[in-house]
Amino acid sequence: MLIAHINKLETGTKDLKVEQLQGGKTIANNVANILQIHPSTASEDIKIAKITNGGRSGRNNLYNQPFKLNWCDKIMGFKKGVAIKNIATHFEEMKNKWEYELIVAVMDTHNFRASDYFDRDKFRKNLPEKYENMEERKIDRYF
């Protein structure tokens, strides 16, 4: 097993390519398989993996197909996850959308955390003032 670092990604690069390896051509020409792994910006528990050099067998279904590696506490390691259609989304910084802000704000209230059940009424009662006047249908789409 060879572990190598990649060169810093150029601005706008949102993919994993063999050319990114330090010593790229020399390393790529002397190994049969290259699996590149990169953290996802979507979650701390997800790594993005992509086989960028698949050997000479021609039987590698995952060659150049990005997929998720999900962290599993039970085995203290990663399990192969689903294939990724758009790898670029895992290289973009997460935006502060109002939806995320709302859920985090409600979850941080003492009343919400102290209760052992969850329903729409409870969610609405713990809304921050900023969201109290938002139309009900827009808030309720989370349930």
Image (cartoon, rainbow, N blue to C red):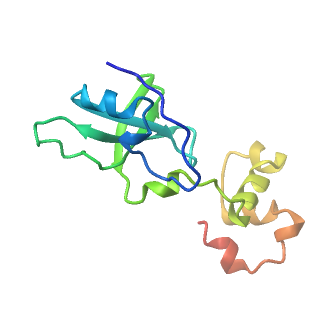
Q: Is residue 51 left or right of residue 42?
A: left
| Rendered image quadrant of residue 119 | bottom right
Q: Residue at x 67, y 77 (%)?
A: 138
Q: Which residue corresponds to the image point at 75% horizontal and 45% vertical from the top-left?
A: 113
Q: Position of residue 135 (x, y in %)?
A: 75, 81
Question: In which quadrant will I find the N terminus?
Answer: top left
Residue 13 in sight: yes
Is 126 drawn above or below residue 59 in the view shown? below
Tell whether 6 sits left or right of 50. right
Front residue of 66 and 132: 66
In-image side of 26 versus 119 (left or right): left
* Position in image of residue 4 (x %, y %): 43, 25
Q: Residue furthest right?
A: 129
Residue 16 vs residue 105: left or right? left
Residue sitting at x 33%, y 34% = 25
Residue 34 x/y as whole percent: 30, 33
Q: Nearer the viewer, residue 119 or 56?
A: 56
Instruction: Return the x and y of residue 48 as percentages of the image width and height.
Output: 44, 42
Q: Quadrant of the C terminus?
A: bottom right
| Residue at (70, 64) in percent of width and height | 97
Say which quarter of the image contains residue 53. Answer: top left
Residue 49 in sight: no
Q: Which of these two is toward me, 96 or 33?
A: 33
